[in-house]
Image (cartoon, rainbow, N blue to C red):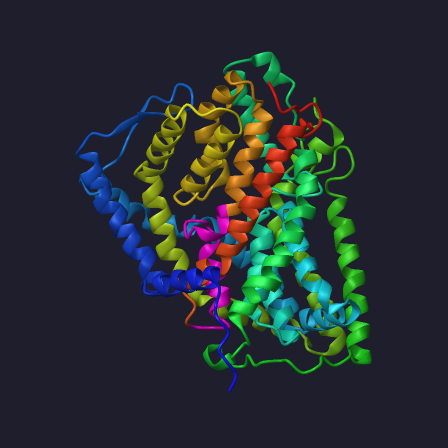
Amino acid sequence: MEKTKKRSILQRFLDTIEKTGNKLPHPVTLFALLALFTLILSAIVSSFGISVEHPAENQGTITVKNLLNGEGINYIFSSMTDNFINFAPLGVVLVTMLGIGVAERSGLISAALRAFVLSIPKSMITGGLVFAGIMSSLASDAGYVVLPPLGAVIYLALGRHPLAGLATAFAGVSAGFSANLLLSGTDVMLSEITRDAAGMLDQEYASNMNVAMNYYFIFVSVFLLTIVGWFVSDKIVEPRLGKFNPINAEEGIEDQSEEMSALKPIEKKGLTLAIISVFASLGLALLLVLFPNSPMRGKEEGLSYFDSIIQSPFMNSLVPIIAILFLIPGIVYGVTTKTIRNDKDVANQMSDTMASMGMFIVLSFTAGQFVAYFAESNFGIVIGVYGAELLENLNLKGIPLIIGFMVVVAFINLFIGSASAKWAMMAPIFVPIMMQLGYSGELTTMAYRVADSSTNIITPLMTYFAIIIAFAQKYDKKVGIGTLISVMFPYSLFFFITWSIMLIIWMLIGLPLGPNAPIHY
């Protein structure tokens, strides 16, 4: 009789997280309860008159708002619709899924995945998925919508557990959000906040900061995180999930462990024409931004060529552009292979896609209320300021100071999902403090990015957490917050530790973090 393999301490710890987390109510109910709890807590805390000085200049004193007084109750009812409509992922997801839905239901994605899987060594797929996730930050938040479900489909097609593929892609997209081989809108946004914070202490120093202040470090980080994510996926996450059992999956999803069939001639033709249409569409899109005076080019005065593209309307429009880049080849493939015969077929495919997003839409309603109430009550700012003061009062210096700062960022990330909101709150406090201790604003920014990115995947307040649960429930209806956190925790832990070690080594060697971006002030 074969002995049962003893589970490691880490696996037993993750099992505990999963069991505990899954005892929580359904995510829809949980977000509704969290919204209610926030309302009640706002009334209790506000009665004590707790207040903090806003870290931004000339913003005055911030107090916790009572959302259960007359004004608060009026806000609850008057804002309910707007809280739902303005929930950050809602529009991004639905618009992107219109294009992806046609590409999927026409058969394009299935054919492309089969071609992809059959053309590369299977042993390289995990690393390729992590790398693609990390690089997807160029497309802002669209990577959250595109890659996790694609990762699940790829793994299922290979006879591997689809949730492992989803987790692998999610880790790359979210935990690796601050790493890239190229600069993105995130670099622009965070560098501007850092520059303003540094200018409070030294305007001349701040004026010499640039958007590429962390570029060298984030470039090298891509390779580190790809290797670490690859290891965690293959050695920890997938073994723990075991063999996929479709018993709790949506109807029509089966274990596809058998060898994938080669493409038929008509599928090859459709795929070839679809690829040509992708490049043609991409070329037309780039014409909108690449040349001077292009209609979607940013302001060019005082900016380099690259900065004028990064800070352009084009970069702010990547979601509809990505939707179109899926829609056009999807139609081309469908027409070629006869899965699309007229415009009604396209409309029906879009409609079927929206019908499948029902759970996410419901999740968006309750999650949107909670996120809005938490922000309106000022809990996020108050928690952030008290956390920052705690770190300052510990009187740490050097590497312990950097590590302590990163721990505080990781903790605050559990309560505030937006990277820009957190940095706008923390930079005016920590950048000047670090500068006075001899550390550059560029280093403080990079330490913030490491801690923030590493813990994105384990906080339910991250705006895309709800949709990842919705994607996961396609393969296992029992997946809840506990399951997802337990699956993603190893990525968060290993990314945080290895990325922090890399930053410490970088500090000790004294390498610049980017062009004209030293470690020391």
Tell me which residue sits at (77%, 69%) in the image.
Answer: 271
Question: Can residue 162 be spotted in the picture?
Answer: yes
The residue shown at (60%, 63%) is 235
Task: Out of 474 and 128, give the one closest to the viewer.
Answer: 128
Q: Is residue 77 above or below residue 360?
A: above
Quarter occupied by residue 124: bottom right
**Image quadrant in which the C terminus is located:** top right
292 horizontally vs 53: left or right: right
Does the segment drawn in magenta span residue 390?
Answer: no
Q: How many marks?
A: 0
Does the magenta segment cover residue 459? yes
Q: Which residues are magenta?
A: 455-477
Residue at 71 percent across and 27 percent down: it is 515
Q: Residue 349: x percent and y percent?
A: 59, 71
In the image: residue 324, left or right of residue 278: left
Extreme residue toward the bottom, this view: 1
- In the image, 390 versus 33, the foreground residue is 390
Residue 371, position as x, y percentages in the image: 37, 47
Residue positioned 34% across, 50% down in the render: 369
Depth check, front residue: 317 or 112: 112
Vertical side of 441 occupied by 280: above or below: below
Visible in this render: residue 142?
no
Q: Does residue 473 appear to the left or right of 281 in the view shown?
A: left
Task: Work out whether residue 185 or residue 380 is closer to the camera in this orientation and state it.
Answer: 380
